[in-house]
């Protein structure tokens, strides 16, 4: 039985809903801004699919306006965590508090092909001056000139920027991003990194970004979490000033540390390893480096 209760402008979820509604990403209704207190507060959150425990008693706090990156091997539960935070899936036990004003963007932009760009931005929203607000959001992502475009005529990067505009127009206090840049080419990804930092600086939502890219996590986030087997095995504050530079010693150190936690040997990462089968086998196993409950001081 699901219990849903309002709490300081947010939503508290306590357990599994009978059947998750097929919600569109980012269609949760907005609420008054609650800048005091954390944007996310999860306590002992467990999520099971049948007998499989995917999230295993997770505790998580994300401060208002904080940018957190979430790393972890394929299948460790990152998307599951995001979906529970977005309210797309229920939790099995524990409590989860999130702001009502949240939005999500995924690896694929999930645009409705029969709706023009601006209509995709306001999809599912019943707001006054929808077109003007869509136009403003599209302008923020540099797409004012494509407001009438059909999704099929957009490049991958443009389509992903429309998806970001769709998130922005909801004025989220919590922005959930699930590998939003993974399908983009390297140059477009660099531009998207700059764009997301600009938008974050301007609107200051709390952000939870799922990524497989260690450099992306260090470049963007205030804090990097590593999830393994349904538990956080690291919670590392990134104290480097922005804009960050990959060549700095501190960046390299943190990079090596995270790769170790993810079970990736630095030599493999440098392309020296020539046995991809062994690499895949290692990926399926347990990281010897990832000990239990490593916790780093956070500002
Ligand atoms: N609806 C579902 N029913 C049953 N099992 C599921 C369901 N959704 C996810 N799982 C399982 O939960 C585990 C975690 O999946 P999840 O998608 O969260 O992983 P992930 O960390 O996001 O992986 P990736 O990095 O590959 O995207 C996987 O074993 C997956 O098969
Ligand atoms: Mg995933």
Image (spheres, helix red, strand yellow):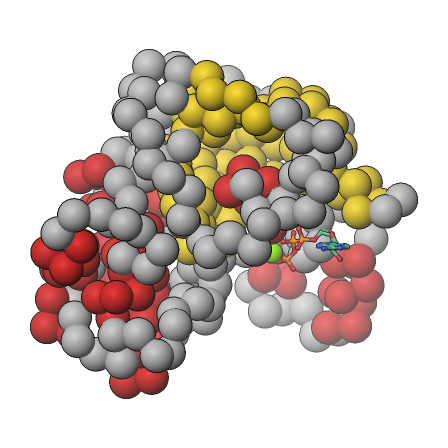
Is 231 drawn above or below residue 181 in the view shown? above
Question: Could you tell me which residue is drawn at 69 percent across and 24 percent down?
Answer: 94
Of residues 211 and 155, the one drawn nearer to the viewer in this rendering: 155
Query: Horizontal and vertical percent for residue 111?
Result: 38, 70
The N terminus lies in quadrant: top right
Say whether residue 218 is left or right of residue 86: left
Question: Could you tell me which residue is drawn at 37 percent across and 39 percent down?
Answer: 29
Asked whether the viewer can see residue 254, the reply is no
Of residues 75 and 119, the one drawn nearer to the viewer in this rendering: 119
Is 161 drawn above or below residue 65 in the view shown? below
Ligand 1's image quarter is bottom right
Is 117 drawn above or below residue 173 in the view shown? below
Quarter where residue 147 is shown? bottom left
Asked whether the viewer can see residue 159, the reply is yes
Query: Horizontal and vertical percent for residue 283?
Result: 75, 58
Question: Could you tell me which residue is drawn at 41 percent across and 29 percent down?
Answer: 99
Question: Could you tell me which residue is drawn at 45 percent across and 40 percent down?
Answer: 208
Of residues 246 and 99, the one drawn nearer to the viewer in this rendering: 99
The C terminus lies in quadrant: top left
Say whether residue 264 is left or right of residue 27: right
Query: Horizontal and vertical percent for residue 245?
Result: 30, 48
- All told, the count of numbered labels is 0
Say whether residue 224 is left or right of residue 13: left
Query: Horizontal and vertical percent for residue 183?
Result: 45, 71
Quarter where residue 64 is shown? top left
């Amino acid at each position: 039985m699901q219990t849903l209760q309002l709490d300081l402008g947010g939503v508290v979820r306590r357990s599994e809903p009978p059947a998750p509604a097929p919600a569109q990403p980012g269609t949760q209704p907005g609420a008054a801004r609650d800048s005091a207190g954390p944007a996310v507060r999860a306590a002992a959150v467990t999520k099971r699919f049948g007998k499989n425990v995917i999230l295993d008693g997770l505790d998580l706090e994300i401060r208002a306006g904080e940018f957190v990156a979430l790393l972890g091997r394929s299948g460790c539960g990152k998307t599951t965590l995001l979906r529970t935070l977005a309210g797309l899936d229920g939790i099995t036990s524990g409590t989860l508090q999130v702001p009502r004003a949240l939005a999500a963007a995924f690896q694929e932009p999930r645009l409705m092909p029969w709706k023009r760009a601006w209509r995709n931005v306001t999809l599912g929203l019943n707001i006054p001056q929808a077109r003007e607000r869509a136009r403003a959001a599209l302008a923020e992502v540099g797409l004012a000139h494509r407001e009438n475009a059909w999704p099929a005529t957009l490049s991958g990067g443009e389509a992903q920027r429309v998806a970001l505009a769709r998130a922005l127009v909801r004025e989220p206090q919590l922005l959930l991003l699930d590998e939003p840049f993974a399908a983009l080419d390297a140059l477009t990804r660099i531009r998207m990194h700059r764009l997301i930092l600009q938008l974050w600086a301007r609107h200051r939502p709390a952000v939870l970004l799922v990524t497989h890219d260690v450099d992306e996590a260090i470049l963007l986030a205030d804090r990097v979490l590593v999830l393994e087997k349904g538990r956080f095995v690291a919670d590392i504050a990134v104290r480097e000033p922005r804009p960050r530079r990959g060549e700095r010693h501190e960046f390299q150190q943190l990079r090596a540390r995270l790769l170790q936690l993810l079970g990736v040997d630095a030599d493999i990462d440098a392309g020296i390893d020539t046995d991809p089968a062994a690499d895949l086998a290692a990926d399926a196993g347990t990281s010897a480096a990832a000990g239990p409950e490593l916790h780093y001081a956070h500002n």
